[in-house]
Image: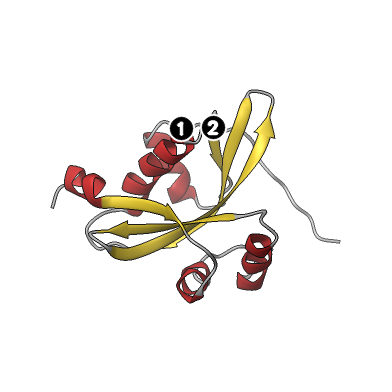
């Protein structure tokens, strides 16, 4: 199956918190956030969830929030997890997220990562470096 075939069958839809979402987000390696944090943020309506499906099969989850910026609303991708043996999910999910954001009237998207490989994949799709975050625990 080619990349275009995967795009044509990929669907993102809003979902509530549930066991499948929790199972996906357990795989996210976030320094400050565990599964319970995501659950609390969704319950407080500070995070929204998208289920990623292909051919009716659930293959992942994306958690995001919306922030007001000087230039308009920005979709902030907080976490994403999933697996599809047919394609690199970043190649198909990033464009789908761009479409979701554009259809919702958002002006931009943003994500933070410490994964160099993800930085390179994003750059190949037109994302650009915007900031660096440094942390020191005391």
Residue 38, image x, y percentages: 62, 65
Give the class, few, some or many, for how many residues have Cα within 10 Å of label 2's Cα (few <14, many ≥20): some
Please tell me in which quadrant of the rendered image residue 110 appears.
Answer: top right
Q: Residue at x 41, y 53 (%)?
A: 13
Label 1 near label 2: C-beta < 8 Å?
Answer: yes
Locate residue 28 relative to residue 47 in the image: left or right.
left
Q: Nearer the viewer, residue 117 or 71?
A: 71
Locate residue 102 relative to residue 107 in the image: left or right.
left
Please tell me in which quadrant of the rendered image residue 98 appears.
Answer: top left
Residue 66, image x, y percentages: 62, 42
Tally of numbered discs: 2
Q: Quadrant of the C terminus?
A: bottom right
Q: Residue at x 32, y 59 (%)?
A: 53
Q: Nearer the viewer, residue 62 or 27?
A: 62
Residue that mark 2 sits on: 106
Residue 2, image x, y percentages: 15, 47
Marks 2 and 1 sit apart, C-alpha to C-alpha, by 5 Å
Disc 2 secondary structure class:
loop
Q: Nearer the viewer, residue 6 or 18?
A: 18
Locate residue 33 relative to residue 127 in the image: left or right.
right
Locate residue 97 relative to residue 8 in the image: left or right.
right
Disc 1 secondary structure class:
helix
Residue that mark 1 sits on: 102
**Image mark for residue 21:** none
Residue 36, image x, y percentages: 65, 72
Give the answer, above or below, for where 2 lies relative to 63. Answer: above
């Amino acid at each position: 199956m080619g990349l275009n075939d995967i795009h044509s069958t990929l669907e993102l839809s809003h979902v509530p918190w549930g066991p499948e979402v929790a199972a996906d987000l357990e795989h996210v390696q976030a320094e400050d956030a565990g599964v319970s944090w995501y659950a609390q943020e969704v319950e407080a309506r500070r995070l929204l969830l998208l289920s990623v499906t292909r051919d009716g099969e659930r293959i992942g989850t994306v958690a995001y929030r919306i922030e007001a910026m000087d230039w308009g609303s920005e979709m902030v991708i907080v976490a994403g997890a999933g697996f599809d043996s047919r394609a690199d999910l970043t190649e198909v999910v990033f464009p789908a997220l761009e479409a979701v954001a554009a259809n919702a009237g958002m002006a931009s998207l943003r994500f933070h990562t410490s994964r160099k490989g993800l930085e390179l994949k994003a750059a190949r799709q037109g994302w650009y470096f915007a900031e660096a975050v440094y942390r020191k625990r005391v």
